[in-house]
Amino acid sequence: MRQKLIIVGAGMAAAYLLQELLEQEHPWQITLIGDEPDVCYNRVMLSGVLAGETADSDLQMLPARHLQQGMQLLANTRVRAVNTREQTVLTEGGELLCYDKLVFATGATVARPDLDVDGIEGVRVLRTLEDVRFLRNQCSNGRRAVVVGGGLLGLEAAHGLNAMGFATSVIHRQSYLMNRQLDAEGGLHLRDKMVQSGIRFYLGNSVSALHANDGALTSIDLQDGSELSCDLLVFATGIEPRTGLARDAGIACARGILVDEYLQTSAPNCFALGECSQLGSHCFGLVAPIKAQAIVLAAQLTGAAAPAFVLEDWPVQLKISGIEIFSAGNVESGGEQLVLHDKSAGIYRRLVLQGDRLVGAVLVGDKRDGIWYAQLIRNAADISRYRPGLMFGKAVSEAMQLSAIAA
Amino acid sequence: MSTCRTTCPYCGVGCGVAAEVDGDKLIAVSGDELHPANAGRLCVKGTTLAETLTSQGRLLHPVVYGERASWDSALDQVAHKLDAVRQAHGPGAIAFYLSGQLLTEDYYVANKLMKGFLGSANVDTNSRLCMSAAVAAYQRAFGADYVPCSYTDLEESDLVVMVGSNAAWTHPVIYQRMLESRKTAPHKQIVVIDPRSTASADAADLHLQIRQGSDGYLFAGLLHYLHAEGKLNTRYIGEHTDGFADALAGTAEMTPPVVAGMTGLALSQLEQFYLLFGNTEKVVTLYSQGINQSATGTDKCNMIINCHLATGRLGRPGMGPFSITGQPNAMGGREVGGLANQLAAHMGFDASDVARVETFWNAPDIAREPGLKAVDMFRAAESGDIRFLWIMATNPAVSLPDTAQVRRALGNCEFVVVSDCVGDTDTAAYADVLLPAMGWGERSGTVTNSERCMSRQRALVPAMGEARPDWWIVTQVARRLGFGHGFNYQHPVEIFTEHAQLSGFDNEGTRDFDISALSSLSEAEYEQMEPTYWPCPVAESVGKPVVDGRFYTAGGLAKFVAVAPELPCWAGDADGLLTLNTGRLRDQWHTMTRTGRVPKLMRHREFFSVSLSPEDALSHGLVESDLVEVRTGSASIMALVRVEDAVPQGQVFCPIHWSDQHSGNACVNGLIPSVTDPLSGQPQLKYARVALSPVAVAGWGLLLTRSLSELPNLAYWSRVPVSGGYLTFFAVADAADIIDVQRELLKPLLPRATRNSHYQDSGLGDFRDVGTVVDRLEYALYSNADRQRLPDREWLSAQLASSPLVDSVPLLAGLDPDTPSSGRLICTCWEVGEREIEQAVVAGAQSVECLGKTLRCGTQCGSCIPELKRMLLRAAV
């Protein structure tokens, strides 16, 4: 009889793990438990669905036959408790499942600010396909939507809502957008570009109160004292790892579920990956490290020579509202700056040097050669010979070196 | 489409040009197979003539005190002022400064008005700067300004001595004819005498790299040698000459060792030359500005002529002392009397000449004394003695020596009229009245080349704007002054036939210039006129000057002139200064008012630079492309450095072409003191003592723009036209100014673009800004602390023409890895770049012929062949 593997959570981390496992011979009888009606879809593309740019079916990350044949799938199912001593999982429906190995892929929730929203209609997050379905059913004509949060998720939501026809505004606490990935000028470039599509921005501001009429949202107050009328409020104010289940099971958690470099939690036969996990002081929210986690964990589970998961400085590669964004290394550190901008084309590129090393790269609107920069940063390569052409990419740098030699 | 035969407006070779005209447009030009000067050949300047017919910079309507005016009011103004000044201050207060660019008919009318009717001989011409020493020397020796040679003599000679001439670049077609004739006559020798190792020297059998200005010693010593070695033609000396004994006595001390000492030549080299000259009967000595532009220019010319007289080597095929002129119609100007010391038609100011011309012109107020020569004329304009100055078709603010003085004169002179086809010259800036003249391709008349061949310049296209022929402009002023009876011309043929009649008037073989056979040409005959050599008298019986041993001196004998050679105010090397030498570049002409508009012609030498020997560069701490200030007294120029083996130690070579229109602080003649040859009045334009100081540069830049743009104050700038716009190279001396300069440069440009891209690396001092309008590049600015990091200029220059633009990043990068540059242009005719040639050499091309077969370079005008040879030589080492 095959050994049992239970994966709690059916989001993108689970999907990546399954992609890895299903690609090879594995010994497991897999049970996948997800609390949404939809499983293993690409959450990153939700705003595209909202905007009408992506079909629902394009979101699917695993072939349907795998979901139907290769495993037991429990959608719309919440887990009530995990017992690490007995190696069991109890669902809300009262079903008790045994496991030989358990994987937490419980993801994250949207962190909401401390505001009184009880009983007010029109206050949402954009996290799930269900959220998208709700928003899509809203009449957008002549209505106003406000997104709280000018990070990646907020901007994606704003793009989707704006494309739906909502008069869309974004409120962001920091002075520039995507402050975790970009620098001030890059953030401003991004704003300028998005303003062109009609979105309004309130930077350095936040929501202080909501007003409703008959339970329906009518306006919000902002920190600076102004009032903004709105019909729909979407929170995109960062994420919190979902650790409740693990914490209750006595597994060591900090902000996320603590794992070692093999994704092992403090409990035997229990692993965690994705947004719910934490390695050292690092939590995860971007695709690249989670994919890497999936590879490490899959190797563990198939008994292959298991590589360790190594924290890297993964570059951030995004596309928001059609604008390519790339960020690598430490973009906030001081040092010499190489700056290229082309305002009307919405292009902004900044490279940060310390001595002869490239330490950071921010590319907005044109992410050509981003991967090369990421390599140079990771390898701490001496870029002095490349410097005159560095900004213009590898081909130009090398051609410049050649012409310098010829001269 | 039709083909029209006309004549090239550039150098004194005067090549025939076949112009393809389609309606109102000149499509292309090629060499006229039927013209005796070139028989189908054409140099690169001539080949690109069609590209010069642009409206850019053209003066399109009269301008009076800065305001557009009608022809009537402008001509009224000129006539009124001319009359008022003459009435108030006498004929000495008015002057015309003419040009070897004018057609013979224009020249004739201007000369006739001033000398005949206004009573002033203050008519001089820029030919004064070019060959007036040669004229004076011919007059001293032959009693007339008679050039006793033709281009076929260069082919038929067994020895050509080129002295003070870089014909490979300045007169490419006759140089190529010479080289071709050597192919079938392998014994033929070419000797080049030049302090620089010029392109002409490359093909020479012997190059005598003499000390600058020491040519007189060489030829004085040659006469001494010819006598000492018994190489004289005593029969010729006895029968046809006068003054030999005195001339020879003057060379008594000019033994080869003395001459070797004075010229800096090795004795063996000197003797090799003397031996060659002594033993070769068919010798042509070809000389040009290097001889003429000297304080002792006339004497030097006579020393050359002395050697030919002493050997009887003139007046026969393949021999003679041959002065070649710089301008298309310098000779025509000489023929009509366009110099202040001539009256008309090779007549001077002796009483009988004056009386004869007075009768012919019916001009009782005729001038009876010579007028002021160019340099003196501008001195008089500064002092206030000349109050009315009319400048036609030339740019004295750049071309005369001591340009600061010339500019003061233009500023001080009460009334300055400039008639020209272009309005954006340094001189035009000083004009009270600007009159638009027709340019080449529009006007119609005749020119005479260096071998006395008269050819027609024909109208190919309609005049631009309100441009008129120069003869018409002068005629209109003459009529307003009440001289209608003498200036009732309707067509240039009327002027030409009058000129021909005057040449034969009361001549009877007494004057060399006689073209009376052409006195009664009809308009139709004039239109069909074939290239015609003078003399062409009605009566064939009068014979040929020089050829039949006949001269125009009082006794009919040629004169030896006894002169002692001198070095130009020789101060030795003790002052720590260098000697300035000036000259021409291969693809440029004069002050670039014509060639400076043709992108192709700017690609051989893009930006203003001076050349130094490697030794002097090293001792001044300079390397290629550094910025240097060249200074003499209070005048200075700023130039890039070219380090060239061709330049001798102790010398700075500077091209003459740049003006304020093309570069900041580049007017080389500003460094030249106005020292003139006392006999001819020709300025010594090829000599000054100068100090060099390296200029530290904090920032270098390139600016590519679609249209002309204001420039801020810069340590250095030089601008060239490129296809679709302009490329400016600049330098900023002070690091503190760089940001301001960038801002100033961008200020007028930013509003022209709809999209601006910007790159900055403050650490490397790298700054770039590119502006586009939709998919069209509008401007690109690159500034860098290191000039090596600026984009390749050839690549950059091509960017305005390449469209549509999809991506501005390669532009900002200043490099597109997918389209490498072909490198500096070597062959202008076929547009072959340095890199292509280098690659062909690497791929196995081992000769000029082989390169020509693979890349076509060097197969048209041939002026790049010396450079191709150097490249092959370099690759072989």
Image (cartoon, grey):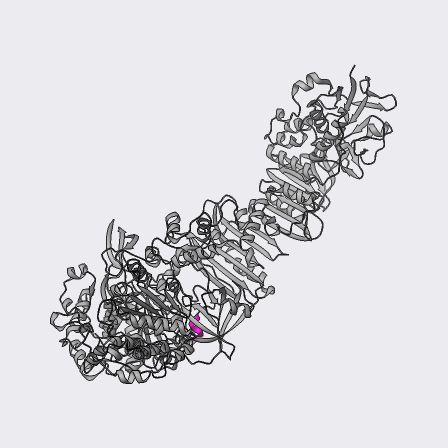
Q: Is residue B805 above or below residue A136?
A: below
Image side of residue B478 versus residue B200, left or right = left
Res B567 seen here: no
Image side of residue B241 versus residue B412, left or right = left
Residue B82 occupies quadrant: bottom left
Q: Position of residue B1 (x, y in %)?
A: 25, 48
Q: Position of residue B253 (x, y in %)?
A: 36, 83
The residue stretch that appears in magenta:
B662-684
Q: Is residue B394 above or below residue B829?
A: below
Residue B460 occupies quadrant: bottom left
Q: Is residue B588 magenta?
A: no
Identify which residue is drawn at 45% across, 65% down.
Answer: B646
Of residues B428 and B346, the one nearer the viewer is B346
Of residues A151 and B92, the one nearer the viewer is B92
Q: Position of residue B129 (x, y in %)?
A: 34, 73
Res A292 seen here: yes
Image side of residue A129 versus residue B535, left or right = right
Q: Is residue B791 above or below residue B496?
A: above
Q: Is residue B682 magenta?
A: yes
User: Magenta: predominant secondary structure element?
Assistant: loop
Q: Position of residue B205 (x, y in %)?
A: 36, 64
Residue A249 occupies quadrant: top right
